[in-house]
Amino acid sequence: MIRKKLKLKFDFVSSEILEKKSKKNRIKFILNKVKDGTILVTDGVMQPEEEMDLIKETMRRVDDGFPGIEVCSLKKELKGFRGFLNKLSDQALKIQSMLTGKPPEKTKLKEGITLIGPAKFIKKIKRNPDSFSVLAGL
Amino acid sequence: MENLLFKFNQKRLELLERELNSFNFENLKIIMKEMLGRFIDWLRGLLGLRRNIKLGIYGDVNVGKTTLANRISLDWTGEEVGKVSEIPHETRTVQKKEKVEIKLKNNRKILLNILDMPGLATKIDYRTFLKYGLSRREAKKRAREATEGVIEAIKWLKNVDAVLAVMDATKDPLTQVNITLLGNLEARKIPVIIVANKIDLKRAKPKRIKECFPQYPVVPVSALTGKNMDQLYEVIAKYARRAK
């Protein structure tokens, strides 16, 4: 009897790699990996609108073999001067999109951590306000 | 002649005095308030200031969104919005109930367009529906329609004025769907009220929802039994006014 080795693949991707991509390409990159069965971990958190776009795009790709994704993100709350700079950068982006009439092509990820994986492998995510644990299996 | 006129006027004054003594001024106050309320409503309508607030009912799958929409609609129009089922993704298209007038204390009124959204999800597996007795073909069809429903619900975020984010008080509220939904509403500056539903169940913990999302108004209700709905209507009126 041939026993097939069952493996789970994790990809740890730097936020810089994702930030270099346009929003559309970023979602495409993530979903291509996840649809291939990879669990992707990155040191950043997407903007809420982008997370919704990710869910929307996932729904377009759902089929018999790919039921969707599991996502979990933990955003780091920046305080003090860094928090102020962060808010300032958000406002600058809003002004830019108001002036140009369309949202910016590339956006920075927020500080934090995100895990995105195929729903068929990730059985459960247990979340706490400042941590999460993942139960995955084949 | 003068004497006769004097007597007549005196009689009229006496009658008037008697009428005034028997008149209930509390009733007059209520009537005046009602008339003033109606006049303001009419004036708002005339100036084009009164409009229907588009109230989106969002949340995870099977948290009781349609039960809540039905409860609101039944309370004020006597009609239901949609069908409720234990099978996930029963609502797969946006269901609307327009011009729902909610009457509040002090003769205040709000006019709502209720938008019952399909449940948001990051995964939809047709195999889940097989457990509820659906055939493979039916399950696949339902899954396909459900994915389209999620996309439609997300697109509608651009068009709602205020949102009721419904959460199941018997389950962990820290789901990615809830976090992403609230983050989006905050970014879009859409007023949001969290509805901690299913408090009629013993294992419900609405306090946990309040602890997880302290920055939002949380109203514990049972859409099924109607418990606490009056409080929800008052909170809707308060926050819906902030709608752009």
Image (spheres, rainbow, N blue to C red):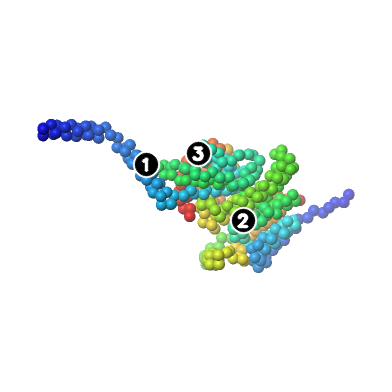
Q: Residue at x 40, y 46 (%)?
A: B41
Element under disc 2: helix
Name the amino acid, label 2. Answer: Met
Image coords of residue B7 (percent x, y): 14, 32
Label 2 to label 3: alpha-carbon separation: 33 Å
Does B136 sit left or right of B117 as displayed? right
List the single residue furthest toward the left: B2
Q: Residue A52 has which mark?
A: 2
Q: Is mark 3 on a helix, strand or loop?
A: loop
Q: How far apart are marks 1 and 3 (CA)?
A: 21 Å
Residue A135 visible in this rendered orientation of the protein: no
Compare residues B44 and B23 and report the one nearer the observer.
Answer: B44
Q: What element carries label 1?
A: helix
Evaluate whether residue A105 shows in this view: yes
Viewer-proximal residue among B162 and B178: B162
Mark 1 or mark 3: name the one nearer the start of the chain.
1
Q: Label 3 marks which chain's residue?
A: B
Q: Is residue A113 left or right of residue B44?
A: right
Residues tagged by mark 2 and mark 3 found on one chain of the structure: no
Q: Residue at x 48, y 53 (%)?
A: B243
Query: Does residue A111 lie above or below A4 as drawn?
Result: below
Residue receiving disc 3: B77
Residue appearing at x 34%, y 39% in the figure: B31
Picture disc at residue B52: none
Say left or right for A48 vs B25: right
